[in-house]
Amino acid sequence: MLKKTICALAVALAAFICAGAASSPIFPVERIGIDGETRFGYLDETGMTVLPYAYTQAGEFADCGLAAVENEKWQTAVIDRGGHLVIPYTDSPVSVDFSDDMVAYRYADHSVYYTLEGETVGSYAGAVGFFEDGILLCQSPASGLYSYVKEDGTPAFEGTFLSAGSFLNGRALVQTTDGTYLAIDTAGQTLYTLEGGITPSYMTIFGEDTIVLSNGTNQALYSLSQSAFLTDFVYKTISEFHEGVAMVQQVNRWGMMDTEGRLLTAPTYYYLSYMGEGLYAARSEDGSASAVDANGNIAYRTTSYAGGFNELRYGLSWHGTASGSLIFFKKNGGYFASLENAENPTLLSENVVRVTQDGKLRYINLSNGNILFEQPTTFDLGNGIAANTVHYEKFMGFLEDGSSHGWDVDFPEISGLPDADVQKSINAAIRAFFLEGPSVSAEYEALEGGYGASIEGSVLVVWANCVSGKGAGAAVWNNSLAFDLNTGEQYQISDLFLSSYMNTVKTLLPSEHEIYLYSYPRVSTEGVTWYYNEYESETRRAYTESYLLTFEQLTDIIDTESAFYHALRTQYTRPATTVAGFSDVSVNHWAASFIQTVAASGLMQGSDGTFRPDEEITAAEVCATIVRSQQLPDASEPMEGLPADAWYTPEVSAAAAAGLLDGLDDFQPEAAISRADTMQIFANLLVKQGSQLPDEQTVEQTLSAFSDAGTIPGDRRAAVVLCMQQGLISGYADGTLQPDYTITRCEFAKLLTVIAG
């Protein structure tokens, strides 16, 4: 059964220097889909996808051209830059390490070594590091004692030790079972014996024969070959050596020393740490932060410091500023680039950084500022519905290892639902679900991850894709919610089944898992999926096993009459929000039904998907529409004064021949028509159809109710009242008729509909 790993980082990779020339840099990029799953691919510095998003997790390529990747079965492989498998997928180790000629899969109690060509070297219990001088250091999982083996697994020489270091230049430092410290050669022969009471700080021989010793309070350098101290016990701390240089602390200041005990830089720094590639991060008395070499030469300095200087990778490092910017600088000194509103940078090549900027995870080419990739924050669910990512953080303190402790969660906010109230209630339930977390006790644990969402029939399904807790005991949280898209009702899994359904479900799920160990089941159009979540341990990360039970398998316990089942089996159809395909006419428009009628009958049309309801209509358009609606015959000759080639001449001429323009002495076909002129045309049509004009008394009584009746021309008053009697027009709310107002297209659509009805 599939084991889906949902941790953010695939395999812990120790970056050892590998042989071979590096080709054009490529680096892993993580992309979270709307299904909530994180997949990795590889891009180059132009943003081109070099290897597809086919990995559940992926590590950076070492200089030798190899990288570790995982699939969704929680298996690890090693690939080359072409994506070819060098080491096939196998059970995932705790970590994968690379050396200059080998790859090591680290498991809890043993390591498996491979050549860079993928050939198995061997499996070694308790292996530490890599083969040095053909010899591998191992610690017995049973006894805890150390020994050395050759590649064939046989002992390099007899003897076990309480503690031991790897060979370097043919020598290693060991502690015998009686507590004596020795320096031995690759045959196990004693080269030097340390005096009693002397305790090495590190089981490593630095340089030719230098070791770091401790007297319990301070540290000093000691030469094995000379059997003499190179320094006194005057240093509170002497670090391990990097490229022949160690950091030393004297009183409360730091400096640097070589393997002969010579101070390269006097202890003057308030803080010192090794960044890599021969540079050190230093804090001075004046509060400035600098990148310095072993001799104290400043490569880069700033007084605007807020974090950073942690490491040097690909010849670059960075530091933050109080304003929230990141500044990147080069190994040889000097400004390289800066990013505003950015944090959490990881250098992926000499030009590319992964960073959180403006709340988004981005991959940026620093040399030109181009965003090569950024995690989408909006996902199209179809039917105009979208899931918009909301980020939530809750800081809860720091762990013992210095890492932050708290919540770092993404959840969706749904947009595009036609019913605003339904959308509001769904989003409120989703927000509460994610901010409450998996359980009451989990509120006090770290929570990291995102979400998934899909539309199943007419049901919106939203689920968590998070890990609750850190380290051993951490657990997957993938519970889900289901909402009816039409009503906003939140469904429970029990709404889908008949009573006592769990008895049947138990027989269909694997018996090796207790039913209470499954998370909340997730519905789809295929059926219902149950998830068994395994806790993280010291040897594996938290993972999930999924079990889909189809509706065919669940036939006997499905309530086929339930609203939940009906919604799952009914394709969601978005309710119409506009009329007749016109994007500018809402179904709530006062003239929506009239526009729908005239459009369906072909009497009025829009253009480019719009009706333009509030635009004025011209006298020619009014005539043409009425002529078509009444199917009036063509005129025997054009109306006097009309252009012979005008599009409207035949229709206006037909209207005039039918007497519809009687009383319109100054007819302007291309001008917007007034309400009074429109009423005259419709009154003429009504009379033609057999209606009678009202008498003078009726006209006066009817118009007396309107304050602007006096502005109606005398020869139009009877026509206006006739149109009112037929329901074509009515007054405005302010008690006016506004006869001089022009007619809009939506108003004319109403007139056409009423007179045709």
Image (cartoon, grey):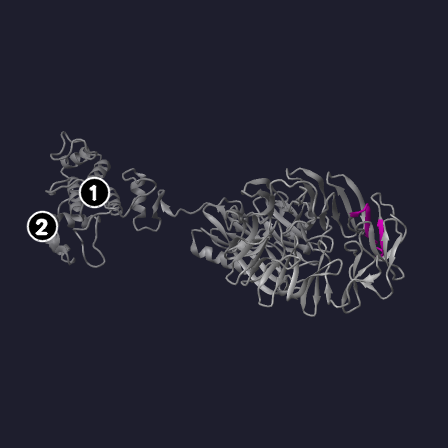
In the picture, measured across the screen, residue 206 lies left or right of residue 271, that is right
Within 10 Å of disc 1 (Cα), the crowding (few <14, some 14-19, many 20+) is: some
Query: Is residue 37 depicted above or below 246 in this figure?
Result: above
Closest to the camera, between mark 1 and mark 2, is: 1
Whether residue 639 is visible here, answered yes or no, is yes
In the picture, measured across the screen, residue 338 lies left or right of residue 695, that is right
In the picture, measured across the screen, residue 604 lies left or right of residue 526, that is left
Residue type at mark 2?
A: Gly
In the picture, measured across the screen, residue 664 lies left or right of residue 603, that is left
Spatial separation of the CA atoms under disc 1 and disc 2: 23 Å
Checking the image for residue 618, the label placed there is 1
Residue 77 or 1: which is nearer the viewer? 77
1 and 2 marks in contact (CB < 8 Å): no
Residue topped by disc 2: 714
Q: Quadrant of the C terminus?
A: top left
Work out whether mark 1 precedes mark 2 in sequence or the reverse, and give the earlier one: 1
* Residue 142 locus on image (x, y percent): 85, 55
Checking the image for residue 177, the label placed there is none
The quarter holding residue 90 reads: top right
Q: Quadrant of the N terminus?
A: top right
* Residue 743 locus on image (x, y percent): 21, 47
The quarter holding residue 581 reads: top left
Residue 686 or 10: which is nearer the viewer? 10
* 570 magenta-colored: no
* Residue 112 locus on image (x, y percent): 77, 46
Q: Which residue is located at x 87 percent, y 47 percent?
A: 156
Residue type at mark 1?
A: Thr
Whether residue 497 is visible here, answered yes or no, is no
Residue 526 or 209: which is nearer the viewer? 209
The quarter holding residue 393 reads: bottom right
Bounds of the magenta span?
131-148
* 144 magenta-colored: yes
